Amino acid sequence: MFRILTLVLSLSALAVSPALAASHANPCNPCRPAATNANPCSPAPQANPCNPCAMPHATPPANPPANPCAMPSPKKPANPCNPCAMPSGQGTSHNTPIRPHAFDTFQQAVALGQKLWSDDEHLGENGVSCLSCHSGFDKLHFEANQNFPHFVPMTGDVVTLDQMINYCLLNPMGGKALDPNSREMTAMAAFYRAYRLQYLQGRVAR
């Protein structure tokens, strides 16, 4: 019986949960067992390697004081112990997404946007597309060099780019408005930006 009990206890000790293992892997984890009762501002670097109150000229050098939620920059890297840091990619599981992942690059959004701007069958019921009115940069007033939002006489109001796109979908095209968070709206806006850049580059080349 004693041997069986010893074996059970040994197996229990080996069955470490992934969360606990991860907590030991990260020396900056404020939830790791060794840091539970540690003074976060202890002058001893061994006590807390991520000390937010460490002196910058300590010997040996300690973790420099830094905004724990600072964003990185080329000249001043952010605090490596940043508890608010987000890994690169599609966000993390505890964030609320605005939609399912849609694009990996801007060019992917532009490619879809170009198709939508040329679509005269699915976005409206009047047989016209965005490029029916705006081919060759026509009627977009790029020469005014205005950024959205701005006043648009056609709407009689100050509108954002997304609102202008929906206005055109509803009115000249006789279709339905797009969800502002949809991949289609992002693509339409991305193509508008690329189209405008194309106009500006052609203007400079003249």
Image (cartoon, helix red, strand yellow):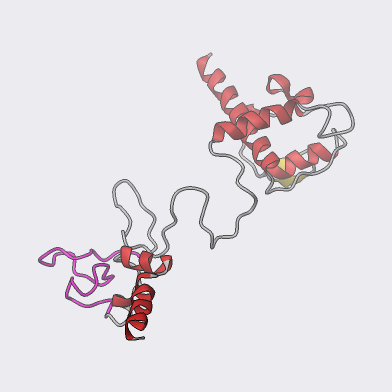
Q: Nearer the viewer, residue 189 or 140?
A: 189
- On screen, residue 79 versus residue 162, left or right, reads left
Q: Nearer the viewer, residue 104 or 173?
A: 104
Residue 73 x/y as whole percent: 35, 49
Looking at the image, the residue that sits furthest to the left is 59
- On screen, residue 116 versus residue 49, left or right, reads right
Residue 188 x/y as whole percent: 68, 36
Q: Residue at x 53, y 22 (%)?
A: 201
Above or below, 162 against 76 in this view is above
**Is residue 123 visible to the viewer in this orientation of the structure?**
yes
Q: Residue at x 30, y 64 (%)?
A: 66
- On screen, residue 118 versus residue 71, left or right, reads right
Magenta residues? 39-68
Q: Main secondary structure of the magenta part?
A: loop
Q: Is residue 46 magenta?
A: yes
Quarter of the image holding residue 70?
Answer: bottom left
